[in-house]
Image (cartoon, rainbow, N blue to C red):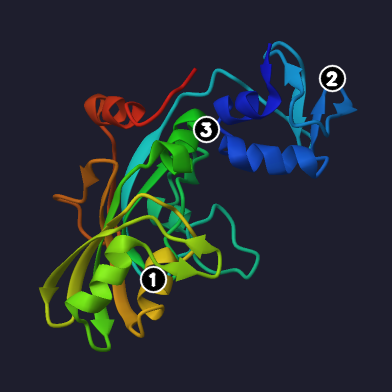
Amino acid sequence: MERLQKLIARAGICSRREAEKLIAAGRVTVDGKIILELGAKADSNQKIRVDGKILHFDTKKIYILLNKPRGFVSTAKDERGRKTVLDLLGENFSERVYPVGRLDLNSEGLLILTNDGDLTNALIHPRFEVEKTYRAKISGELTEEKLDKLRAGIELDDGLTAPAEIYLLGENSVEVTIHEGRNRQVRRMFAAIGCDVKRLWRIKFAGLTLEGLKVGQWRELTAEEVAQLYKTGDFD
């Protein structure tokens, strides 16, 4: 028996965190019974359904590295009809995968897509402190004094950020490494010191880079790269 949210993640539906939201919303049934308890356990031999669709646990795991361009949302579906990162995979790609974390509409760069819910959970869970590195073009005066505030941690409306690694690359260009995953975090950090992020792209995530991958292109991860990602967290 396993926790229900872990089983849902193992079936490739979503991360454990998202699975908890599905359970709380009454969208999950086990053998026909709606389950609302986050601590509920089940077995993969039982009939587990999400939104009426039965889960299968023999799904082949898929791991994709994508160089996201601007103008695409990092979701599987968009209620407003905007293009999603799944559109970049092409019409012939029929497997069900989901973005690991998000890059906002106008942000670019490295994004992982997978149907491995356990791995997704490890990569986005704060306790694993997975590093993400960005390059940013900034408008507004950048001084070491201002950057030191970000390096030490700065107060945002959802709390104090963890210390960030920041290098000034040029007059209006910086490289930023963080290990949190708050919504639009890098943009909000610079707004807090009176600067505006004009361009933002992620160049590194959990040790992976975009080397050899042009904007809009994608490839499957190698077995070695997947093993590297699995070193980020505890999968017990």
Residue at the extreme bottom of the image, as rendered: 140
Q: Position of residue 11 (x, y in %)?
A: 59, 26
Q: Residues within 10 Å of mark 3 (few under 14, many from 20)?
A: many
| Residue 117 tag number | 3
Q: Position of residue 155 (x, y in %)?
A: 46, 68
Q: Amino acid at mark 2?
A: Asp
How far is mark 3 from mark 1, CA to CA? 29 Å
Q: Residues within 10 Å of mark 2 (few under 14, many from 20)?
A: few
Earlier in the chain: of badge 3 and badge 1, it is 3
How far is mark 3 from mark 2, CA to CA? 22 Å
**Residue that badge 2 annotates:** 31
How far is mark 1 from mark 2, CA to CA? 47 Å
Q: Secondary structure at mark 1?
A: helix
Q: Position of residue 83 (x, y in %)?
A: 49, 66
Q: Which residue occupies 76% across, 14% down?
A: 46
Q: Which residue occupies 32% across, 57% down?
A: 163
146 over 118 or under it: above or below: below
Q: Residues within 10 Å of mark 1 (few under 14, many from 20)?
A: many
Q: Quadrant of residue 51?
A: top right
Q: Quadrant of residue 72?
A: bottom left
Using the image as rendered, state which of residue 73 and residue 83 is in the foreground: 73
